[in-house]
Image (spheres, rainbow, N blue to C red):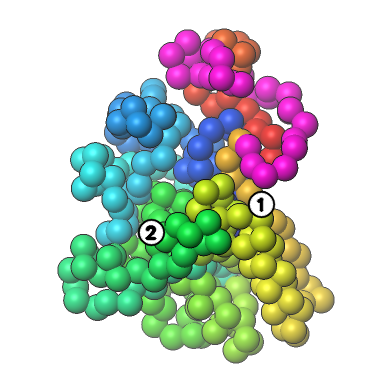
Amino acid sequence: MLNILLLVITFMVLILGPSTPGHINLISGQTIGALPANTKIPPSLKYDGIVNGTLIGDIDPKFDDCSRNSKLYDVTVAMQGKNIGDHMNAKGVTWGWFSGGFRLLSKTGNATLDCNSRQSHTSTSEISNKDYYPDVEPFQYYNSTANPHHLPPTSVEMVGHTDQANHQYDLTHFWNASEGGNMPSVSFIKAPTYQDGHPEISDPLEEQTFLVNTVNRLERLPEWNSTAVIITWDDSDGWYDHVMPLIVSQSDDPINDALLGRQGLCGHAPTGAALDRCGYGPR
């Protein structure tokens, strides 16, 4: 049996935009179906949040106790429709999303206190960040695949199966399960923030350290010979030069579309097509 493992570094971009839409695209192939249908967030964050039901900004998920925007901006977002997790559940495929820092260290029952107990690290740029942030955990946007209270699996044997964790785990749960002979068929591995390669809060050396250590550890598992590893990134820029792709998903929203610092470069969407999904991105 082939094991699929996606190393999610801070995703293969299907749009030209910020992190959250890239993550949502990875698991559902679209960013339409956001609720509320129109939402603005502060201009300092550079992006509107939701336009015409399309998610275009970094807004935290509704189904996560650690969402910040619910406190700072009085808005979170929920996604309608199905994602790849729903389809794997329907087919009985074992799977999981494993995030660095997803496990809460405190167990007070108070969401604010518990979320403040999240593990932190300081990057080589001397910026301290929590290892886990909700806006890059896409399954938390869908009620069907969310684990709002960050509950652990009921046992190592249940990792990959449906229980109180609902397929959303800490990164340590992946290694506990896999090194115990229980690797899920499909695994998404998300690096802790300081190792996710994102400019300012991480760097390429931190990212490469995470990648090398992860792959080396995987090679020691008996499933290695039947494991496919896919490495994906998010955002529409990064540390390396890219070749500008064709604008396959065209959009002509005069207010919210922008490319290369200018508006009007995202083409013309066919009549009736969803707007605000200019892409594909260069990754």
Q: State the residue lying farthest toward the front.
A: 126
User: What x and y, as percent, mark residue 267?
Assistant: 63, 13
User: What x and y, as percent, mark residue 104?
Assistant: 34, 73
At label 2, the amino acid type is Ala
Q: Can residue 270 be seen from the camera position used here?
A: no
**Tag 1's secondary structure?**
strand
Quarter occupied by the C terminus: top right
Q: Is residue 213 left or right of residue 154?
A: right
User: What x and y, as percent, mark residue 120?
Assistant: 41, 67
User: What x and y, as percent, mark residue 182?
Assistant: 60, 83
Precedes in sequence: disc 2 or disc 1: 2
Q: Is residue 210 above or below residue 219?
A: above
Q: Is residue 186 left or right of residue 158?
A: right
The answer to which of 206 and 13 lies nearer the viewer is 206
Q: Is residue 200 above or below residue 266?
A: below
Quarter occupied by the N terminus: bottom right
Q: Which mark is residue 146?
A: 2
Q: State the residue lying farthest toward the bottom.
A: 180
**Tag 2's secondary structure?**
loop
The answer to which of 126 and 175 lies nearer the viewer is 126
Label 2 close to label 1 by CB (< 8 Å): no
The verdict on residue 255 being magenta is: yes
Residue under the point 28% across and 65% down: 115
Q: Is residue 151 left or right of residue 250?
A: left
Residue under the point 51% across and 85% down: 157
- The boundaries of the magenta stretch are 237-263
Q: CA distance from mark 2 to mark 1?
A: 22 Å
* Residue 260, picture quadrant: top right
* Residue underneath mark 1: 232
